[in-house]
Image (tube, rainbow, N blue to C red):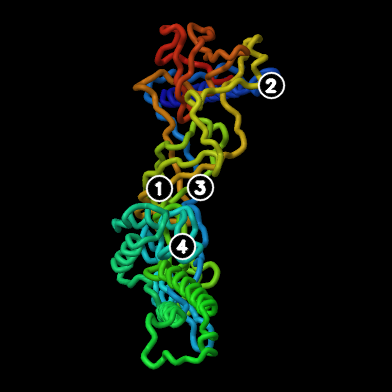
Amino acid sequence: MRRGRKRGRSRTRQLGVIVAVVTVVGAGGWFAGSRMQSPADAAAAQEAPKAGAVTVAVEQRALTATVVAQGSLEYGSPRGLGLAGAVGTAEESSEGGGPAQRVTRAPTPGRRLAEGDVLMQVSGRPVMVLRGSVPMYRTIGPGSSGDDVRQLQKALTRLGFSTGGVTGTYGPGTASAVSSWYRSKGYTAQEPGSADRQRLGELETAVSDAQLALLNAQGPDEQAPGDSGQSEGGQAAESKEAQALQIASAKKQLRLANAALSDFKAGFGTKVPAGEVVFLAELPVRVDKSKVRPGDTPDGEVVSVTDSDVVVKATVPGADAASLKAGMAVRVTTPDGKEAAGVLSEVGGSGAEPKKAAGTGNEPESSEAESSEAEGGGAPAGGTSSAPVPLLVTIAKPGALGKAAGGAATVTIEVGDSDGEVLTVPVAAVQTSAGGQARVRVERDGRVIRVDVDLGISADGLVEVKPDDGDALRKGDLVVVGR
């Protein structure tokens, strides 16, 4: 009995093993069969899926259009300056030559100069700056007249020193104003030097000598006692004809002496030497570089100056420049995060007529693919790049940016914004018909329809769209941007 039971259990175990093996083999065959492909199936699996439309949802948001450009920070309009003549009065020495002019205080780089300020010193005398378009070219003093004198009088009046009127002629009122101006700066105005005073004395002596010669020629009114016995020969020598000639000659000499004295006195007094004033068309300015040091002779260019405003020079593509015009507000940012407000001064370079904004300046333009519109393809909108256009941005109050001159800066110019939230689509979604009508393709109910739109402001790759039919386009609609 026990041996029979053992044989039964053995057959059962063998049968279980056989069933398990068959099951495993069957599962392996099924798995292998599910992974195997025919050549045709393998080729089909490698084919790319059929192309479908790439769509993006219509958004409703506010847009702010900006133009961003990279540029460099600089101080504007650098130019060199020289002196128009001697500083002070170059009096003659005993050897006949004037004393050498020497710089006693050089210009200070980085200093801001306003009207009336001292630029430098030469031989202890000041060189000052005034605003005016007529360059200094001569010494201005009593008796001078002309546009340069009128310019000087206007400058003194602006500084608060009355000249008695802007007449164009240098008179006592102008001399007094010049003296007051110099005193306010800690200097004495240029008064007549020893050579001038000596010359004045010589002319006054010449007048006195001429007067005495005339008196001698005219003779005494009455003869002195004891002179009645003059000989007939002496009476002939002092004939009336000879006396008349002497009187005429003496009178002529007196007239000439008086004229010379009068002419000299007309220019005798407080003067502005040619080298003591530099007229500049615009003030204030900033000292850029000093070309001289103390002890140098102030010949040629002595200093270079720039505008006191910091400027940014940048360029933008012509398509962006079309939306810019002079006077726009600008935000200037340096790489280290410093910011300042600026103004767009020039678009297109110096002397170019500033460009004015046309529409939004960002409307998509027709492309060469317009001909495909008739076939249903349409042409993607978007302007084409043109030649770079230079920009000049002025920063009146640079603050910390003043120390960054010579470095890089980013300029951001807002060219417009939407009136609140508007419908927007990617610029790539807009097509332009051959007739110039902008439109978008909307995927709706399994088909694509075209919706005519008017374009508004664009920014950050998006453009405002206004459907001709107000319900033809709504937030969330899917517009085609490609395939």
Confirm or deny contact between disc 2 and disc 3 (CB under 8 A).
no
Q: Quick one: 199 or 376, which is closer to the camera? A: 199
**What element does badge 2 sit on?**
helix
Q: Which mark is residue 372?
A: none
Residue flagged by tag 3: what amino acid is it? Lys
Q: Quick one: 40 or 56, which is closer to the camera? A: 56
Mark 3 neighbour class, 10 Å CA radius: few under 14, some 14 to 19, many 20 or more:
many
Q: Who's the residue at 42% across and 65% down the image?
A: 141
Q: Is residue 355 left or right of residue 162?
A: right
Q: Quick one: 443 or 178, which is closer to the camera? A: 178
Q: Quick one: 222 or 93, which is closer to the camera? A: 222
Mark 2 neighbour class, 10 Å CA radius: few under 14, some 14 to 19, many 20 or more:
few
> Is residue 75 shown to the viewer in this render?
no
Q: Which residue is mark 4?
A: 288
User: Residue 24: image x %, image y %?
Assistant: 54, 24
Q: Which residue is mark 2?
A: 43
- Quadrant holding the C terminus: top right
Q: Which residue is mark 1?
A: 395
User: Residue 294: image x %, image y %?
Assistant: 45, 77
Distance of mark 2 from mark 1, alpha carbons?
Answer: 67 Å
Distance of mark 3 from mark 4, alpha carbons?
Answer: 18 Å
Q: Is residue 69 above or below residue 137?
A: above
Residue flagged by tag 2: what amino acid is it? Ala
**What element does badge 1 sit on?**
strand
Distance of mark 4 from mark 2, alpha carbons?
Answer: 75 Å
